[in-house]
Amino acid sequence: MPAGGDPKTGDRGGASETVRAVICGDVALSALRPLGLTVRSKPDFVLTPAIEDLAAGLLKYARKRGGRKRWADLIIHAQFIDLRPERDNPAWDTLMGALWDALSGLEIAPEAVDAARRVLDRTGLLASPKRSMLHKS
């Protein structure tokens, strides 16, 4: 995305790419602070993350406890993140359940970790070091 942002979405300065990187677990939640984004923010853009973004983030936060609850809170409650169900994807409900578990302070279940791995493996993203770059608008 150009440094000036995306005129189609109203995103100025690539904030949606930073949000996507946070969802993927590629950057810390603190990366949103300089952009003025919090769970209560109402920026000019809405990001609809791909199921692969959620799967990648779940895998990262399954391995580390710190920040998991805040990460899930952002994804579930931020008005600038639109979680559109992928009804024809059997992993969707499992990943959403894992997000709610994380928000509740629970561990991410092994079944959810397996589902996230299957999502990424199916798309060839599990081994890709540049996974988040594949979802640029």
Image (tube, grey):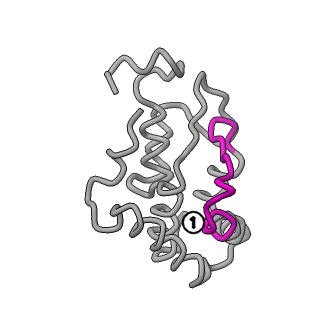
The image quarter in which residue 101 lies: bottom right
Task: Identify the residue at horizontal 58%, vertical 26% (top origin).
Answer: 45
**Residue picked out by circle 1:** 68
Task: Identify the residue at horizontal 54%, vertical 74% (top origin).
Answer: 115
Q: Is residue 78 left or right of residue 17?
A: right
Q: Please, what is the dominant secondary structure of the magenta stretch?
A: loop
What is the three-letter code of the residue carrying label 1? Arg
Q: Is residue 78 above or below residue 9?
A: below
| Extreme residue in the bottom direction | 110
Q: Nearer the viewer, residue 51 or 24?
A: 51
Span highlighted in magenta in the image: 78-94
Task: Identify the residue at horizontal 35%, vertical 67% (top origin).
Answer: 126
Q: Position of residue 66 (x, y in %)?
A: 52, 69
Q: Position of residue 77 (x, y in %)?
A: 71, 47
Q: Position of residue 36 (x, y in %)?
A: 54, 31
Image quarter where the N terminus lies is top left
Residue 58 magenta-highlighted = no
Q: Is residue 137 above or below residue 74?
A: above
Q: Is residue 15 above or below residue 93?
A: above
Image quarter where the C terminus lies is top left
Residue 83 magenta-highlighted = yes
Q: Residues within 10 Å of mark 1 (few under 14, many from 20)?
A: many
Q: Is residue 62 left or right of residue 40?
A: left
Q: Is residue 75 left or right of residue 35?
A: right
Q: Position of residue 117 (x, y in %)?
A: 45, 73
Say which element carries label 1.
helix
